[in-house]
């Protein structure tokens, strides 16, 4: 029943900055200092997002509606909280010491806050579902999955710019901004043959909660 949400996540529905990878030995000290400020604060939020996303993926596809509702609601809240904290980290670090830094910062903060708001909207949708009627719940969950797809389509240009050039190189060096993995499998995770479990490998090769 939860497989549509899992599939949406495995397709990259979460707004992220993928910073593991390319790095440079020539990053300016000021840029590196800015990146460290952001990434030191980002690390726990990145982990929080990874765990929340994995909860959605691993929630039993044939589980009880009430269990799915509770798991997805908490996951969406956690991701929203993490995005707000990430926006605050970018804002609090000050203007990036690069060309057009002020605009890059403003756009990234706006985008992260908008994504947080969108996830809170999904949480409200989940909270309103009728878990006592399995068919109505399944139909409602489809609407949530559709909402998740819309988040995927949100403009990511500002975030791509933030991870490009000197900033991207400096942030890629910081452990706090690198790929996170779920700290542990979610309770009630699916058997390996279930629909949701099959979606998980698609995530395993992606930084599903990197800033």
Image: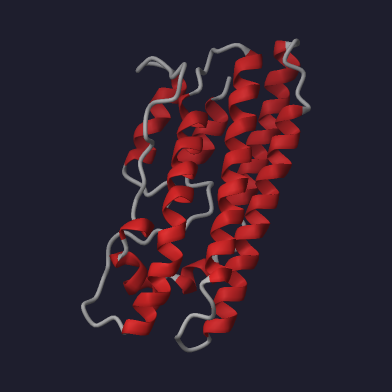
Front-most of 108 and 199? 108
| Above-or-below relation of 8 to 112 | above
Q: Is residue 165 visible?
A: no
| Above-or-below relation of 143 to 88 | above
Tell me: 164 left or right of 73.
left
Front-most of 195 and 100? 100
At 36% across and 57% down in the image, what residue appears? 176
At 62% across and 74% down in the image, what residue appears? 106
Tell me: 83 left or right of 128.
left
Residue 20, how many percent across, how many down?
31, 59
Question: Where does the C terminus fall, quadrant-wise?
Answer: bottom left
How does the figure colour the protein chain or chains?
secondary structure
Q: Quadrant of residue 10?
A: top left
At 48% across and 47% down in the image, what residue appears? 12
Front-most of 84 and 1? 84
Farthest left residue?
25
At 46% across and 19% down in the image, what residue appears? 187
| Above-or-below relation of 87 to 13 | below
């Amino acid at each position: 029943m939860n497989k549509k949400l899992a599939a949406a996540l495995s397709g990259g529905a979460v707004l992220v900055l993928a910073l593991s990878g390319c790095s440079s030995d020539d990053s300016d000290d000021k840029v590196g200092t800015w990146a460290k400020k952001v990434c030191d604060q980002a690390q726990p939020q990145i982990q929080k997002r990874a765990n929340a996303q994995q909860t959605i993926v691993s929630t039993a596809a044939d589980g009880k509606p009430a269990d799915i509702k509770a798991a997805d609601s908490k996951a969406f809240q956690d991701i929203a909280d993490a995005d707000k904290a990430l926006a605050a980290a970018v804002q609090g670090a000050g203007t990036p010491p690069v060309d057009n830094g002020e605009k890059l910062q403003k756009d990234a903060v706006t985008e992260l806050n908008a994504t947080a708001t969108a996830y809170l909207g999904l949480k409200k949708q989940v909270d309103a579902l009728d878990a006592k009627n399995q068919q109505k719940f399944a139909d409602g969950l489809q609407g949530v999955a559709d909402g998740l797809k819309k988040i995927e389509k949100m403009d990511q240009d500002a975030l791509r710019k933030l991870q490009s050039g000197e900033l991207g190189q400096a942030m890629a060096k910081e452990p706090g901004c690198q790929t996170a993995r779920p700290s542990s499998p979610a309770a009630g995770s699916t058997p390996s043959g279930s629909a949701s479990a099959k979606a998980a490998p698609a995530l395993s090769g992606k930084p599903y909660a990197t800033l």
